[in-house]
Image (cartoon, coloured by chain):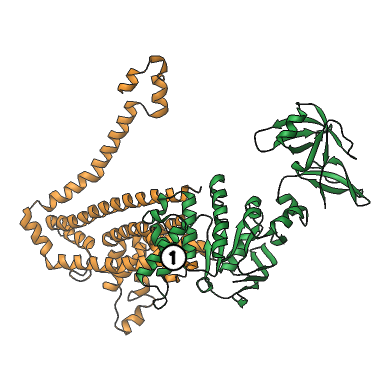
Chain colours: A green, B orange
Amino acid sequence: MSIEAREITKRFGSFVALDRVSLRVKAGELVALLGPSGSGKTTLLRIVAGLEFPDSGSVLLDEQETTGRSVQERGVGFVFQHYALFRHMSVFDNVAFGLTVKPRRERLPAAKIKARVHELLKLIQLDWLASHYPSQLSGGQRQRVALARALAVEPRVLLLDEPFGALDAKVRQELRRWLRRLHDEIHVTSIFVTHDQEEALEVADRVVVMNAGRIEQEGSPNDVYHEPANAFVYDFLGNFNLFHARVEDGKAYISEPVNGRPAPANGDRLAYVRPHLMNIDRQTDEPNPLSVRVKHINSAGPLVKVELATDRGDHIHVEISHERYDQLQLKKDEAVFVSPRNMKVF
Amino acid sequence: MATTALAPAALRPPAAVKVAARQDPVLVRRGLMAAGLCFLGLFLVLPLTAVFANALSGGFAAYWAAIKQPEALSAVRLTLLAALIAVPLNVVFGLAASWCIARFDFAGKQLLLTLIDVPFTVSPVISGMLFVLLFGAQGLFGGWLMDHNFKIVFAVPGIVLATVFVTFPFVARELIPSIMAVGSDEEQAALTLGASGWRTFFRITLPNIKWSLLYGVILCNARAMGEFGAVSVVSGHIRGLTNTMPLYVEILYNDYQFAPAFAIASLLAMLALVTLVAKSVVEWKSARDLAASRAEAGEYR
């Protein structure tokens, strides 16, 4: 079922959480709302769910006007960051809750509810924990139970509010792959909110980048990562070095790094370069290499992180492969050249 | 301490450091404990023993006869009636008010909080006077009430009103922090799963705050049964009609009927003991539940 938000505005006091935001999610799509805290992504999700109501604008579920409908009427599944499991109920009762509170004429017979709950617990591979209480589960298990509970009522859309935000790095990586596989199986239209760009890029069909109550860019993970619409998106999706640059005949030439100092107003632009898109060389025929000194090397990780500094003391971060590092045999305080292989000028 | 003795002397921490860091010197500990026990004995155990000793000074038969007096039984009935009305009213009010205060921001929230505390801060006698001023013969609504042949002051309704008033804050004060601590996530989850507001309240909210609620009810009940000042002002002390147990004790005592006075007082003392035990049980159970929910909330990983 499709989800549409039209021109949604929401204020909390004088703070504008959402400023005329419009969003369309096609049936069966898995969309990530990505942004820093305070960007309005959770507010948008809660408005779609009916947990919050917009000051203006409208929400449509399945092309039907839904703005004034209560959360119970909307038939959405909602997964909370801190699980919000019912602490006084067993895992089984948690998952069964949505089925047992249905009006009498819609409610399944007890035996069918039981079968359905066990089916869901098998889906999340926690059937053996049915009689446990939430306090006895690990964080990852709790979030899976929360997901099963949301899916029990066969929601028309699934909304996840930072579902993995409270989990540690290893578990969150596991769970997000599991979520992706689950979505491929059940195809329920889903929106999930996250501030973790890696998570958004890995899991979603489409990424919507939000900032300060507005949408900055939306597109496939590939488009958003490789063709960021503006400096904010580029900034939010990864680390970068910032340089003064001038553009001549469609080509950009970088001069010195920008380090907290405001850009001079002589027609200079700003060039953004990712650390892994820079070369380190001893000799170079690049058009505009920067002469720098090696300050610090950290080779623990998939890439070797090298921190370099210009004569003026501006820092540049570069990431090179271990092969290249072995080739170069870099030493601390050695003078080298760095040059960008690729950059974005905004 | 056997393990300490076995460890080489060099590995052992210096004794003086250990004592200073972990605990106070023996003398201080013993002294504090003795002071605490003395206080407890002097102000709690001794009076309590005295009440029962005096109550039974005429023997069991006299004790039993004092309690079986129709006036005494009427006082017990009235006390129970007042508590039976006041406690449920305060539960309903306390739940509504604490839920509003804990969940919503609204104009006048601070004022409501202050108003809830008024019965705590105002002397009970003044609370009683207030009802006399409102509903007494010379009071604001006294004339109208008289015309309609409805008695509040110096009658049972006045006693109930005064009891409700002085026990007003107990349940709400107990529940506000509890509801805040539980948070609204679970309630929201229940709503998204299709549960109505009432169902969410009875199946999610109430089970989560049941121990605080029970604790509030116990305190509220103890105060309702033991209240003297406010009730005394509105009662009129009509024997067999408007005397609650505490008032009846005073009347007997003023009549130099010491043994019967202490007999009734012993009933109140027993109520206090039962309340204390119930309170401890509730505290123990809620602490256990709290530990479980802490584990639930703590492991955000």
Q: Residue B96: which quarter of the image?
A: bottom left
Q: Position of residue A84 (x, y in %)?
A: 48, 58
Crowd class of label 1 (few under 14; some 14 to 19; many from 20; radius 10 Å): many
**What residue do we see at 69% from left, 38% from top?**
A303
Front-most of residues A296 and A187? A187
Q: Residue furthest right?
A: A249
Q: Is residue B169 left or right of residue A326?
A: left
Chain of the residue under the numbered disc 1 shown in the image:
B
Picture coordinates of residue B109 (x, y %)? 51, 63
Specify whether B91 is left or right of A267: left
Which quarter of the rendering shows the N terminus of chain B?
top left
Give the answer, above or below, for where B60 lies relative to B33.
Answer: below
Q: Which residue corresponds to the image point at 53% horizontal and 63% vertical from the top-left?
A: A78
Please tell me which residue is depicted at 49% across the width and 64% down the height of the picture.
Answer: A151
Element class at badge 1: helix
* Residue A158 in sight here: yes
Front position in the image: A91 or A322: A322
The three-letter code of the residue at mark 1 reads Ala
Figure label count: 1
On the picture, is B191 further left or further right than B46? right
Whether residue B154 can be seen here: no
In the rendered image of this protein, does residue B271 appear above or below residue A106?
A: above
The answer to which image quadrant residue B83 occupies is: bottom left
Query: Where in the figure is residue B68, as x and y percent of width and height?
Result: 11, 64
**Spot occupied by residue B186 in the image (x, y as percentages of width and height):** 46, 61
Of A6 and B150, nearer the camera is: A6
Q: Is residue B156 above or below residue A215?
A: below
In this view of the protein, which residue sits in the foreground, A252 or B4?
A: A252
Q: Is residue B285 above or below residue A103?
A: above
Q: Quadrant of residue B39?
A: top left
- Residue tagged by mark 1? B97
